[in-house]
Amino acid sequence: MKNEIRELSKYRMEKAIDDLETSKIMLSNNKFSQSVNRSYYAMFHAIRSLLTLHEFDSQKHSGIISYFNRNFIKSGKIEVEYSKMLTSAFKIRTDSDYKDFYILTRDDAKKQFENAGKLINRIQEYLNKSEAETD
């Protein structure tokens, strides 16, 4: 893996981890909508970290999700459950951010936080394996 691509991937993963930590803080302070928002962005930045392998990026969330599904899920490189987590998080985050009176519970926010942690761990595992194979 080229050094600049490694650095960009690492930066994006650090951003994902920071967002996950912020989600945890928001959850512990009963800020469920904000926690869900940060959980989604933790996933989003982890996926963008992964997409650096293909030197792909998009200004649109739908472009990132679509590329991830097409090149990592359908190919079997990453398990389908992670696509489902990401798609669900995107919908919940969008509904929470834009729909009036959309109510989230602690359980909703906790599940999104846990899923974000699982997805980040899986992406890190994949990145570590890819890096080892290219070294």
Image (spheres, rainbow, N blue to C red):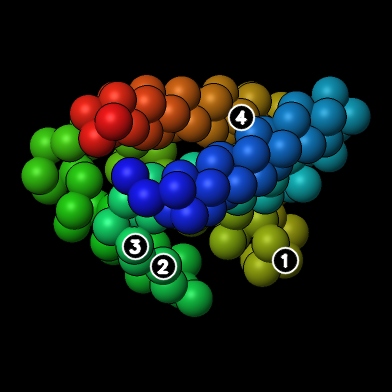
Secondary structure beneath dot 2 equals loop
Q: Which of the two labelled residues, at mark 4 and mark 1, occupies the earlier sequence position?
A: 1
Q: Which of the two labelled residues, at mark 2 and mark 4, occupies the earlier sequence position?
A: 2
Q: Is residue 131 left or right of residue 46?
A: left
Q: Which of the two labelled residues, at mark 1 and mark 3, occupies the earlier sequence position?
A: 3
Horizontal and vertical percent for residue 25? 83, 29
Q: Is residue 20 left or right of residue 131?
A: right
Is residue 128 positioned above or below 70 on the image? above
The three-letter amino acid code for the residue at tag 3 is: Glu
The three-letter amino acid code for the residue at tag 2 is: Asp
The three-letter amino acid code for the residue at tag 1 is: Asp
Q: CA distance from mark 2 to mark 3?
A: 7 Å
Secondary structure beneath dot 4 equals helix
Which residue is labeled 4 in the image? 113
Q: CA distance from mark 2 to mark 4?
A: 24 Å
Q: Return the residue found at the far bottom.
A: 59
| Image quadrant where one finds the C terminus | top left
Q: Is residue 91 left or right of residue 87?
A: right
Marks 4 and 3: which is nearer the front? 3
Marks 2 and 4: which is nearer the front? 2
Q: CA distance from mark 4 to mark 3?
A: 28 Å
Is residue 131 positioned above or below 91 on the image? above
Crowdedness near tag 3: few (<14), some (14–19) or many (≥20) residues, C-alpha within 10 Å: few
Is residue 79 positioned above or below 86 on the image? above
At x 41%, y 67%, the residue is 57
| Image quadrant where one finds the N terminus | top left
Image quadrant of residue 109? top right
Which residue is labeled 2 in the image? 57
Which residue is labeled 3 in the image? 55
